[in-house]
Amino acid sequence: MSPRPLHHDPFDALGDPHRRAIVELLGSGGRSVREIADTLPISRPAVSRHLRLLKEAGLVSDRPEGTRRIYELDSEGVAAVQAYLERVWGDVAARFRLAAENTTPRERAG
């Protein structure tokens, strides 16, 4: 299965603090636009615009539930971002962890 084409770069979408806050909120489960707007200092129309951009970037999906839509993290899009970060930073993080674990506090202060 080939990945679906994205209309926006996920990292561009995550560049906005409100969109990052929305992603963090959705990390604990699906929410409606109203539920998201009630926790942020922005209007429901602004939340809807941010959700549209996150959806176009492949980070969020939505589903109907009665008369409203429930937004949740798109596991495929989030996994793609995570895989990219691990590919880019994985070796660096592992080397840093190894160095930190093998350095005494006195050597670190030194």
Image (tube, rainbow, N blue to C red):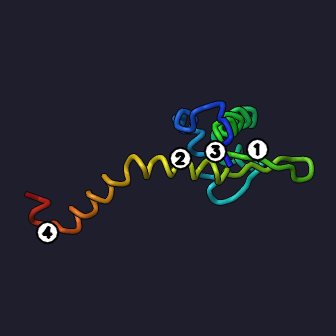
Element at label 4: loop
Q: Could you say where residue 92 lies in the image, as x and y percent from the top left?
A: 30, 52
Is 19 displayed left or right of 91 in the figure?
A: right
Kindly identify the residue that appears in the image at 86 percent across and 47 percent down: 68
Q: How crowded is mark 4: few (under 14 residues within 10 Å), some or many (20 or more)?
A: few
Q: How far apart are marks 4 and 1 (CA)?
A: 50 Å
Of 29 and 82, nearer the camera is 82
Of 52 and 87, nearer the camera is 87
* Disc nearest the viewer among 2 and 4: 2
Earlier-in-chain disc, 2 versus 4: 2
Earlier-in-chain disc, 2 versus 1: 1
Q: Indicate which disc residue 104 carries.
A: 4
Kindly identify the residue that appears in the image at 42 percent across and 49 percent down: 87
Q: Mark 1 points at which residue?
A: 33
Of 17 and 102, nearer the camera is 102
Q: How far apart are marks 2 and 1 (CA)?
A: 24 Å
Q: Mark 2 points at which residue?
A: 81
Amino acid type indicated by mark 4: Thr
Kindly identify the residue that appears in the image at 63 percent across and 45 percent down: 22
Amino acid type indicated by mark 3: Leu
